[in-house]
Amino acid sequence: MTQDAYATYPSLRDRPVFVTGGGSGIGESVVEHFCAQGSRVTFVDVAREASEALVARIAATGAPPPRFVHADLRDIAALQDAIAGARAAHGPLRVLVNNAANDDRHKVEAVSVPYWDDRMAVNLRHQFFAAQAAIPQMKEAGGGSIVNFGSVSWMNGEGGYPAYTAAKAAVHGLTRGLARDFGPDHVRVNTVVPGWVMTERQVRLWLDADGERQIRENQCIKDKLYPPDIARMVLWLAADDSRMCTAQNFVVDAGWS
C-alpha cells in the first residue's frame, strides 16, 4: 500500500523533527514518512551520497525536502552543532528520533577496549547527548517527543554481537530515566523496538535460507518486516495522538519476541 493509505497526523504538519542516521535503512523511511506528513525535518548521517540522493528524491515528490547535515555521531560536538542548526532553520525541536546504530557481528574473544568503546559510541552514547541538546528546545516549545531505538536482539537472548546487545539493552534504561526527568516539561520519551527489518543491508548480509526459516518459525505473523512498518510507529509516537504515552517500549517484530 502507498503512504496515503495510512494515517495522517495533523499535529505533525510543520513540526520540527530531528532524525539521526536518516540516510539509509529504517532512518531513511522515517525521514520519508515525516516529510510526507509535512514536518520540517533535519537529519544527520555519515553517508553523504545516499543522504543527498534521499533529499533529491523527496523534493521530487513535492513534499517539503529535509535538511541533511553530514556528521559522524561519534563526534558529539558535531551532533550538538547539528541540533542547534536545526533550531536555527526550523524553530525549536518538537521531535527527536534517535535511530542511528550499527549491528556489526563480533566474537567475545575479538573485542578490545577501543572496539567496545566504539560500539557504545555508535549505538548508545549519542542517544543521550542528542536528548541533552534537544531538551532545552522542547521546553521552549512547550513539549515534545523523543523516540529512542532499541532492539529485540537482547530481549531474545541472541549471541554473536554482545557489545551491540549490551548497548541496546541500555537504551531501555535510558528511556525510562529520561522519561521521568523530562515528564514535568511535557516531553515524552519512548523506545521503538524493531524486530528483524528487511533493510537493504540486512538482506545483503544475513538473509539466507536459514534466516527465512527463522522468520517462519519465530514470527506470529509470517510476513517480512520492512522499514515503513517501523516508521509508522515512530510517527504515532511523535504525534499528539500518543500524548500520554511515555517511558514505554513499543515492540514491532511481528510477534517474534
Image: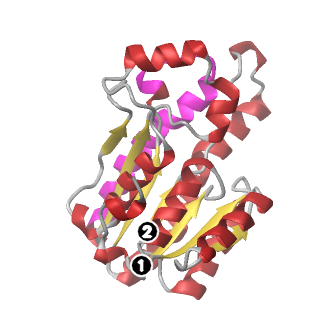
161 within the magenta span? yes
Residue 186 position (above or below residue 224): below
Q: Quadrant of residue 130?
A: bottom right
Q: Quadrant of residue 161?
A: top right
106 within the magenta span? no
Asked whether residue 21 appears in the rendered view, the answer is: yes
Please report whichever mark, 1 or 2, sits nearer to the chain's N-terminal start.
1
State the residue lying farthest toward the front.
Answer: 1
Q: Quadrant of residue 254?
A: top left
Foreground: 10 or 148?
10
**Residue 197 horizontal/vertical position (percent):** 51, 36
Inter-mark Cα distance, 1 to 2: 8 Å
**Residue at 42% from the left image edge and 58% from the top image edge:** 2
**Residue 229 horizontal/vertical position (percent):** 41, 46
Three-letter code for the amino acid on which mark 2 is drawn: Val
Q: Which portion, as a residue range, is magenta?
A: 154-183
Element class at badge 2 = strand
Q: Quadrant of the C terminus?
A: top left
Read off the residue under disc 1: 15
Read off the residue under disc 2: 95
Please tell me how crowded label 2 is: few (under 14), some (14-19), or many (20+) other residues with Cα within 10 Å: many
**Residue at 29% from the left image edge and 46% from the top image edge:** 248
**Residue 128 horizontal/vertical position (percent):** 53, 55
State the residue lying farthest toward the left.
Answer: 244
Foreground: 185 or 214?
214
Asked whether residue 103 appears in the rendered view, the answer is: no
